[in-house]
Image: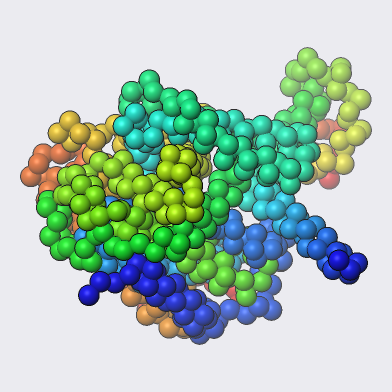
Amino acid sequence: MTVSPLLAALVCLAAYGVAYHFYARFLANRVFALDPTRPTPAVRHRDDVDYVPANRYVLFGHQYASITGLSPMLGPAIAVIWGWLPAMLWVVLGAIFIGAVHDFGALVVSIRARGMSLGKVTENLVGRRGKTLFHLVIFFLIALAMGVFVHVIAVLFSPDFYPEAVLPSGVLIGVAVAMGVAVHRGGWGIRGLTLVGLAAALALAFLGIRYPVVGPSLAQWKWLLLAYAFAASVLPVWLLLQPRDYINSLLLYVGVGAMFVGFAATNPSFAAPAVDLSPAGAPPIVPFVFVVIACGAASGFHALVSSGTSAKQIATEGDARFVGYGAMVGESLLGLMAVLACTAGFVSRQAWLERYESWQAADGLGNNIAAFVRGTTHFLETLGIPEAIGGTFVAVIVVSFALTSLDSATRLLRYNVSEMGETLGVAALGNRYLASAVAIAAIWVFAFIQVDGEFAGLILWQLFGTTNQLLAGLALLAVTLYLLRRGKPLVYTAAPMGFMLASTLTVMGTNLVGFWTAGQWLLLATAAIVFTLAVWLVAEAALAVARFRRNPVLDGLEVVFRKE
Amino acid sequence: MDEGRGKRIGERLARARTLLGEFYAAPYRGAVARARRDEDDLFMLFVFAEMMGVPNPAAYYTLELQPLLLERFHEWHTRMGLEHSPLDHFRCC
């Protein structure tokens, strides 16, 4: 029996709908006990700077755009080597029962804690060690992911892949800067600029095909990208980050919309098998699929967005389901599109096998992301967009996702470095240039790391996935402890936490043995640190629960979570 | 098209524009405001540096700005970690 991808996609969409309507509502009412009449931090602590009640659609748009990056495309693009079914199941079910619950929970706890960031909440719930743990996890998470992103962008820019995406990507940065200056200094309206920005982005695709940029080597591209990340980290946000994020979000909406319409119009069939449990050279599907696809199914990174900015701007608790759970469903949709593009976007089984012949063939991350670009381009062709234009357009979108993640994440890493400096008593790290330099150095390590003369892309990706799931476990721990204190049901957050920790520990254990046998010392050290952090987290969880059992009212908590 | 409908469409467009503007501004409002505040703090230092014994070549030129900034003086010195006015002849609180 053959399953039509369109049918499978419809089933998935229905599952999202049911989950949002019933499960998320159940969580909102029974578990988190949301009360739309309770004043949120945005209302109670309104200062029109950080705390501002925002429109729910604006907030959703921001949350969605911030959590969606390159990862929900890249993860599924790798994982479909095990067939389309496992990837699709994990993307959909993972998002429904773990990822979205995690984002939603982090948002709610942060709202109840005066909009504090997750790090602060953890400090209050788990203790000082919890905060240190949190900082370390974030440090590795960002450094690893950005090392991979730098590599992926450099590969995409290389002559073998999409040199025609270079010019549009570069000019888009220029357009963003011009836009930032126009709005900030010139007081220009947003409407005209939006049209100009979008038109420029589309027109640039043509220009890029005309003038592909070939020249810099892979290593040179990496250096250029690191320089860009450094600049983005120290420049004022209104000049680069703000307009770039804005244009990028619009591109995201246009792009994802067009991909789904194109997919429905194409009505393709699967070129990939439903399940292949032993593709050549691949690690065992369980638990590896759970860390290879992080974003799109569940991602700890989202807790940073939920708990930092969104929680301070939510106007009523009633909006939390839409913003927290809803945005994650939105991101999962992109993950689903990635699964579909990489399995049904190929013309034949033969074409698919050429890309996914073995784990090693899929090893080049550039190859994986190219599979995504190629698949979606195929869908767009049905809409009458020529392959060359569509391919460049998608490649530009992919690159600008990676670049916006790179610039904002480097800044986050810089803040992280400064905060760790504060904890350690190194005041110099408060300097933004020095902190940025440390951040870039950490990214540099992972952007250039090699195994047997090849870039260690896929291994780093697993390490990133593991760290990300570890952070998700940490956030879920904070949420569960909060619920424990409130006397609410725990299983809906505790079970996902257990699942995340179990898969993380298994993957790390397997990797440790592998690195040891192969003598990969740098990777071994990184993996050992991540493994230690995971064990540390399990210990903290046990200690926190034991502490609570002994003394149900903890001092630190009382201050934070005052009864209304 | 009757007038009521045209008006409704006009209202919707205006609302869409407001939302778009919010979508641009909201995520970075805090960061921009903080950066602006840091700049203002530096400016205050320029204006009041001489009074606190910090040699400032621009003092002569910034003197006439002092009365304009007095209202913000309290907020500034508390943010700089000084509970009371650091100036003997210049009681603030």
Q: Residue pushed farthest top?
A: B57
- Residue A326: horizontal and vertical position, in percent? 52, 68
Q: Can residue A49 be seen in this view?
A: no
Front-lying residue, B36 or A2:
A2
Q: Which quadrant, please, contains the N terminus of chain A?
A: bottom left
- Residue A269: horizontal and vertical position, in percent? 31, 63
Residue visible at 24% across and 49% down in the picture: A351
Residue visible at 77% across and 43% down in the picture: A189
Q: Which quadrant, please, contains the C terminus of chain A?
A: bottom right
- Residue A474: horizontal and vertical position, in percent? 38, 62
The scheme the figure's colours follow is: rainbow
Q: Is residue A391 visible?
A: yes
Residue visible at 44% across and 27% down in the picture: A212
- Residue A160: horizontal and vertical position, in percent? 31, 32
Front-lying residue, A349 or A510:
A349
- In the depicted structure, whether residue A169 falls above or below residue A246: above
Side of B3 where A549 appears, left or right = left
Residue visible at 43% across and 83% down in the picture: A489
Side of A492 where A54 appears, left or right = right
- In the depicted structure, whether residue A333 falls above or below residue A206: below
Give the quarter of the image for residue A451.
top left
Front-lying residue, A333 or A245:
A333
Give the quarter of the image for residue A440.
top left
- In the depicted structure, whether residue A560 falls above or below residue A129: below
Side of A296 where A114 appears, left or right = right
